[in-house]
Amino acid sequence: MILTERKKQGVLLLFAGFLFFASSQNAWASLPQKTILILFPYESNTPGFIHFDTSFRSSLTAKTDYYFEFYVECLDLARFPDARYHAKLIDFFHEKYGKLKIDLIVATLRQSLEFFNAYGRSFLPETPVILYEQDRRFLDDRTSMQNVVSLIGHLDMEGTLDLALRLQPDVRNVFVVSGASRHDQSAEAIAREAFRGFENRVRLSYLSGLPMDELIQRVSQLPEHSMLFYLSILQDGNGQTFKSPEALALLSPEANAPIYSVSETYMGSGILGGNLISHSAHGARAAQTALRILAGEKPENVQMPEESGNRYVFDARLLEHWGIDEEKLPPGADVRYRKFSIWNKYRWQIIAVFLILIFQALRISALAISLRKQRRTDLALRNAERKYRTLADFNYDWEYWTAPDGRLLYVSPSCERITGYSSRQFTEDPALFHEIVVPEDRQLWDGHHHDHQTALEFRVIQFRIRTRVGDMRWIEHACIPVIDDRDQFQGFRASNRDITERKKAELEVQLHREELAHIARITTLGELATSLAHEINQPLTAIRCNAEAALRFLSSHSPNLEEVRQILDDIINDDTRAGEVIRRIRTLVKKEHSQHSPVDLNESVRETIALVRNTSVLPGLKIMTELDHELPAVRGDAVQLQQVTLNLLMNAVDAIKRAPAASRKVVVKTTLWDDQTAVVMVRDSGEGIEKDVMERLFEPFYTTKGEGLGMGLSISRSIIKAHGGRIWADNNREGGATFFFTLPLEGRQQP
Amino acid sequence: MTGDKPVVYVVDDDPSVLRALERLLRSADLGLETFTSALDFLNFQHPEAPGCLILDVKMPGVSGLELQERMARQGILFPIIFITGHGTVPLSVQAMKAGAVDFLMKPFDPKDLLEIVFKALDKDRQAKWEQRELKRLRERLKTLTPREAQVFRSVVAGMLNKQIAYDLGTAEKTIKVHRARIMEKMGAKSLAELVRFAEKLGIGSPSS
């Protein structure tokens, strides 16, 4: 046989229950037994009584002092008021309980006590009685209270109506509802008495003892500003009996005004609320009283404090229906039947769950946002990468980046345009770069390459490469080390520019400059022609005359050979002298590319002066020198530097033409300008230079001479500038002018 | 007529040229004096002997042309041969106008120079001789009495004895005596010679 899961559970429960009972039985067996008879005047399933009874019994059984035996008799006196019935009932009880020892009787409501007093005292004279009554006003003086402890509640009609009027201050009519039974009438009587104080505030109407149909009709057509006050209906005007909450439940759906009442038993049956009597609370109090009596206290000695045990209880649904603000309720009021009872019960859990949900939702949103941001950043990065890649790729220059170990990370496509080799060829063959550098420049390149591994700084060098098809190109290479945020070396970024055209232009400019300088030298020599002719004619004349004389001496009878030897010596010397002049001229006339080498400025000055010799140029001219014999060499083109000195000398000679022959003096001086620079000064004794002339001295085609191109000083300036020096003029304090030019000493000049 | 050996004066500031010229002239058996500056030459006591001057045009201090002027002022009269390394036409014209014998451009043919030097020396010898004869005639002229000087002017003017006597209011015979004394005193062998003397002395020209 296969048991289902459910059946299994059932079997287990039964078994557990059996064990529990078994052990309890054992426990009870040892306790003193107490027998309690509970009397109730109406039928057994009256809610108020059930509340009381349940509370009373559970309170007692919770105590482990006694083992209790309960007997309950519901007398049903309302439906059976006949005295004969009462007599038969007593007989029955007598028969039923005659042999039992009843330790305590609990008489609920006055009718129970009266019934017991009337019929039970005869056979249970000593048994103590606890009377429970809802309100003192139901009692009368005739009721015997011998051996009775009374627990009296309070139906708070005045308090409830007062509260109702405070909750609904605009109410003008109060309809008090009660039935036709004796109890109903008693309640009505109490109400009429209790509400007397309200007659000046509201109109009180009593709907008492009406047939149920009529009553329903009435409560559904109440005037405005009305309320109902429900007391009790055990029997209607037609003699039909009801349980009071049931009667209320018939009325309340039809009523067009809120219903107030005074008993907790009506809660849920249609009353809005009130200061309600709690039968459960009284049940518990009755249990306490019972324990004291069972413990041996005399009933007359037991004084229970008068506690109403009433509570303010309201029906949330009806409060809402009638639009009554919960805020107006008395403090501590118990509001039941809330619509959102789950909310009330699990408010914090719900809030917690909700908060967790919100938190999670926020987290998810944050994640989503962060993800989106990430995507956006990725996109931006990709865009930036594309942008800079495009920039690099389309750069006209040939760019490359290296890793710190020298590996090529990137080579821009322009390398192919410049070198003929593709960027892949460069990245795959690290030696390619070195190989395409022309052999003459490889040392420069390798040196630079070595240096920049050790010194991290911005560098620019120029060198030549051989392209794939064999052309030569000039490259200007600039590289800069990349240092990241943490000062870490991240390799080099280099740019190679094809400067072949620029170099060509530079060479052309240099050629033009050289050509111009050459022309200027020729021109100067032209100006010197008479002087130079004289310089050559003198030795030539001497040679010719010497030779003629020698011939004559030799044809004489006794030639003086010693004389002839001297003549030949002189001829050789004169020839040398003429040759020197020609050499000087040829030096200045020859057309060569400028060649830089160490130049002794003193020698240069002497050579120049030899060309502008004395009187052959200007009568009375004295050219003096003040040469610093310790002056170190400078680096430069000897011819061009001599040209500058010659030019300044010629200008000086020109400047003193108008001076009297006796004071025609030019001084050429060489000295150190500072520890890195030499200076040549050409001082004349002329009239000096006027201010406006001074400003334009070095401009091309500017001249103060009748003849001349006006290029001399301009060319001199370009020569000195190309040598890294400076040229300028100044008037002397004692008259005349001085021209200066400086040159960096050998080994100290900038390339 | 003196037998003095002619002297060639050379002024050039270039010692090498100067030495070469000196040798050239010596090889032609010429006497010479060399100077490296014009002032040295001016300060020199010149002998009476015929001579000539070879002068470089451009020299420091006093130039060739300046020297030419100063010689003229001081009455130092030598034929001047200019030599120059870079002669120009205006320069040579100026020199020739001032009485230069020749103007040679360096480098020149030494033979040309020697030829010119000889010519110049001949010229100077001639000039020197003529100077001396004029001096002698002037001294002879001074020995004539005033009457004889008067008759001398009339004779070289071509007047007859009779005309002279009539003009002077004396006898023709007296004139004849004067005439003979004049011929004797002036050293003239004939009337033609006397007339040539008178011309040299600038006396009794037909125009005057």
Image (cartoon, helix red, strand yellow):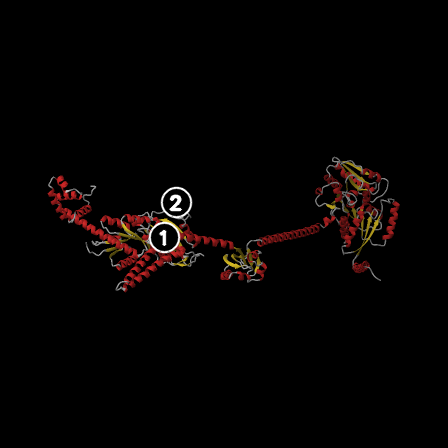
Percent x, y for residue A713? Answer: 40, 50
Which corner quadrant holds the N terminus of chain A? bottom right
* Mark closest to the chain's N terminus, 1 or 2: 1
Residue A269 visible in this rendered orientation of the protein: yes
Figure check: A449 above or below A184: below
Give the number of the disc on residue A692. Answer: 2
Which corner quadrant holds the C terminus of chain A? bottom left
Q: Does mark 2 fall on the same chain as mark 1?
A: yes
Marks 1, 2: nearer the viewer: 1
Q: Nearer the viewer, residue A392 or A114?
A: A392
At label 1, the amino acid type is Ala
- The residue tagged with tag 1: helix, strand or loop? helix
Q: Hey, which quadrant is residue B162 in on the image?
A: top left
Chain at tag 1: A
Residue linked to disc 1: A529
Give the number of the disc on residue A737. Answer: none
Percent x, y for residue A20? Answer: 79, 59
Q: Nearer the viewer, residue A471 or A72?
A: A471
Q: CA distance from mark 1 to mark 2?
A: 32 Å
User: In this rendering, would A732 be left or right of A68?
Assistant: left
Chain at tag 2: A
- The residue tagged with tag 2: helix, strand or loop? helix
At label 2, the amino acid type is Asp
Q: Nearer the viewer, residue A328 or A712?
A: A712
Percent x, y for residue A461? Answer: 50, 57
Residue B40 visible in this rendered orientation of the protein: no
Figure check: B45 above or below A249: below
Q: Nearer the viewer, residue A103 or A530?
A: A530
Query: Dot 1, crowdedness within 10 Å: few (<14), some or many (≥20)?
Result: some
